[in-house]
Amino acid sequence: MASLQHRKSLEKRDSDEKTRSQDEKEAYDAEVSVSVADTADEDEALKLVGRERAAQFSEEYNRKLRRKLDFLIPPLCAAVYFTQFLDKTSLNYASIMGFPITGQHYNLVSLAFYLGFLVWEFPTVYISQKLRVAKYLGANIIIWGIILMCHAAATSFGAFFALRFLLGMCESCVAPILILIISMFYKKDEQATRISWFYVMNGLTQVFGGFVAYGISFDDGHLLAPYKIIYLLLGGLAILVGICVVIWLPDSPIHARALTKEERVAALERVRNDQGGIANKTLKKEQAIEALLDVRTWLIVLTTLLTSIPNGALSNFSNIIIKSFGYTSKQTLILSTPGGAVASLTTLLCGWYSDRKNERMIPIVFCLIPTIVGSAMLIGLNDSGNKGALLFATYLIGTFGSALSSVYAYNASNTSGHTKKNTINAVTLVSFSIGNIIGTEIFQPKDAPAYIPGKTAIMVLLTVQLFVSFLLRWINVRLNKQKKRVLEEEKARKGWTDEEVQKERERHAFLDLTDKQNIFFVYTA
């Protein structure tokens, strides 16, 4: 039924296109705030669909399509994120399994990953815009798998530093590309949940990695040191995931081989009203400048910094902190796993709430409060000898990790214009890198084993972030009120009916306009 309706709609559209006069086209183009005469200015979606909605699909059809996408895209994204986080935190496991680098050199090796991440973030994002994003992602995963396996052959500080730097370069493309793919295929009120489905891997890798490391720790190291086995296994897994991504992960709805042509059109039409666009391979200087002049960009930078500094510290020192309570290395590996379960549950709940209530900042507040409480407990109970309470506090601290998932969802839902999207995602990940670099240095060897200054810093930073979250939410609410007022004025000035307003909304959807240029774009608080 949908197919017949689609064919009739296409025939009608072709007929309308032929009869529309050139004068009418020019009049319409003149009203658009940017030139659309050159197809480079438009969204790639227009290769499959018209500027106006030409095909209607039933709710049932769209539900089946979304279910099909859910079985294809989130599992592959989750596999990528699972592999990335496991590879990134492999140093945490290696640190208590005979890793030869210790003290300040260990801090520097940890920092090297984020230096590579920082240096390559902008280049990798803009390179990916010119290429097929999923294929580019898959190639990077295969390369980082090879680099990870090379860790087993390294013996010196310099070699480990160089390998971690290259690992950071390869992994810097992951989050921007996954956010972009989710925003291409899913509506705004579906994005946070799907992002949480892959971001939850951060917590699950902590559980999985802890048990695997625990099992390997029983090896006597006769053939290979336990930390070398970790690197070989994780590198091989990354290569396997990279191959799967190259074969099966779609670059966009336009190039989704797993979908029929009708399903590709339906995938584009179901996200049309969100005004987010799909893809455009032209780098637009004005969009990059707009992103850098947007005050919300810098508040997202601040948010990412305030939540990434604790991440940089805890992702590499959490096992060391637990061990300092008086547990053995083997006990530490097992006792670290519930923290991953707590982080996973928090991520899923925040993603569900974010879409259900159309909120992005409130979930961040929810996940930060337990971490602030947990940090205070670690400081206050430091000399108590109460191992159970201290361990419980480390589990509470794990909730803050889902904040970055909400930031990813915020970017996906609140930005349009392909170059602007890429710029904001790159700036966010650069901030993530800087925050993690700083984080590796807040737990200093001289403060061991209690690390009170570092724990205090985490508590203060996340408390400040509570206020930043409320400020960002207020700005988006205010911007929506302004847009609504402008749209009402435009509607009155041009005498548009509600149907004409909807047609204008459809025409603006795939013109690669930024959220500021497009009066029909609605922000998510």
Image (cartoon, rainbow, N blue to C red):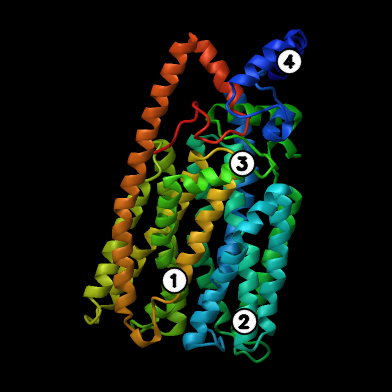
Q: Earlier in the sequence, mark 2 or mark 3?
A: 2
Query: Where residue 10 sits: x, y (%)?
Result: 74, 16
For the N terminus, give its image quadrant.
top right
- Indicate whether 329 appears above or below 130: below
- Indicate whether 452 appears above or below 86: below
User: How far separated are the C-alphas under marks 2 and 4?
Assistant: 60 Å
User: How far separated are the C-alphas under marks 2 and 3?
Assistant: 36 Å
Q: Which residue is identified by label 4?
A: 4
Q: Quadrant of residue 277?
A: top right
Q: Which residue is identified by label 3?
A: 418
Q: Amino acid at mark 3?
A: His
- Indicate whether 394 appears above or below 517: below
Q: Relative to the observer, which residue lies in front, 190 or 519?
A: 519
Q: Which mark is residue 438?
A: 1
Q: Relative to the observer, which residue lies in front, 490 or 327?
A: 490
User: How far separated are the C-alphas under marks 1 and 4?
Assistant: 58 Å
Q: Which mark is residue 160?
A: 2
State which mark lies toward you, 2 or 4.
Answer: 2
Q: Amino acid at mark 2?
A: Phe
Helix, strand or loop under label 4: helix
Helix, strand or loop under label 2: helix
Q: Relative to the observer, which residue lies in front, 50 or 205?
A: 50
